[in-house]
Amino acid sequence: MSSEYAKQLGTKLRAIRTQQGLSLHGVEEKSQGRWKAVVVGSYERGDRAVTVQRLAELADFYGVPVQELLPGTTPGGAAEPPPKLVLDLERLAHVPAEKAGPLQRYAATIQSQRGDYNGKVLSIRQDDLRTLAVIYDQSPSVLTEQLINWGVLGADARRAVAHEDA
């Protein structure tokens, strides 16, 4: 890995960490020691090469796609990015379990993986919506409409699905 590329990668890593309000020590604490502050700091400075495996694990820890960490990539490219898919967990709790059970279990799994228990909202990815569509045996656009009707997704989620279909 060239030193310039490593520095650009480090800049992206630092940006994601600081967007999440984490210090290097905070990363170490939140990861329960899995990610040492000195190691993450050396990745961010470009002093230490990061393997693809470790980069994927770090992206998972931060809850972002790996491509967001790679230099030369911008979210959504030059076009307007699709709206985020944000589940309203408070409203989800009021949807009858026979309808929302699979979604509630899926959301709980994501929260557990991310260590994100704010209980109010949960951002999901397009891939998550496609997976949920398979679970519900519906197309992503039909499931999106259903989730909007339940009040679990905002109406702007339609644009995300339309962007995906384009």
Image: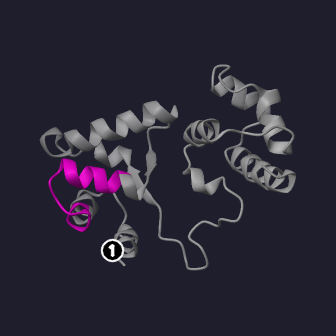
Mark 1, Cα crowd under 10 Å, few <14 / some 14-19 / many 20+, is: few
40 or 18, nearer to the observer: 40
Quarter occupied by residue 110:
top left
Q: Position of residue 67 (x, y in %)?
A: 59, 56
Does the magenta portion include 79?
A: no
Nearest the eye: 137 or 121: 137
Q: Which quadrant does the C terminus fall into?
A: bottom left
Foreground: 2 or 74? 2
Q: Tell me which residue sits at (38%, 50%) in the image.
A: 88
| Name of the residue lying farthest toward the front | 1
At 21% across and 61% down in the image, what residue appears? 146
Q: Is residue 83 visible?
A: yes
Specify start and end residues of the magenta stretch as a single range. Answer: 128-143
Residue at image position (56%, 49%) is 64
Name the amino acid, label 1.
Answer: Asp
* Residue 137 belongs to the span the image colors magenta: yes
Q: List x then y, in percent, for residue 11.
A: 79, 52
**Secondary structure of the magenta portion, mostly?**
helix
For label 1, the SS is: helix
Image-quadrant location for residue 26: top right
Locate residue 65, reporting x and y percent: 54, 51
Task: Examine the rendered structure and indicate whether residue 8 appears above or below residue 61.
Answer: below
The residue carrying mark 1 is 165
Q: Is residue 19 left or right of residue 5?
A: left
- Left or right placement of residue 22 versus residue 121 in this view: right
Q: Residue 49 at x, y = what percent?
A: 77, 40
How are the colours assigned in the image? Answer: one colour
Residue 152 visible here = no
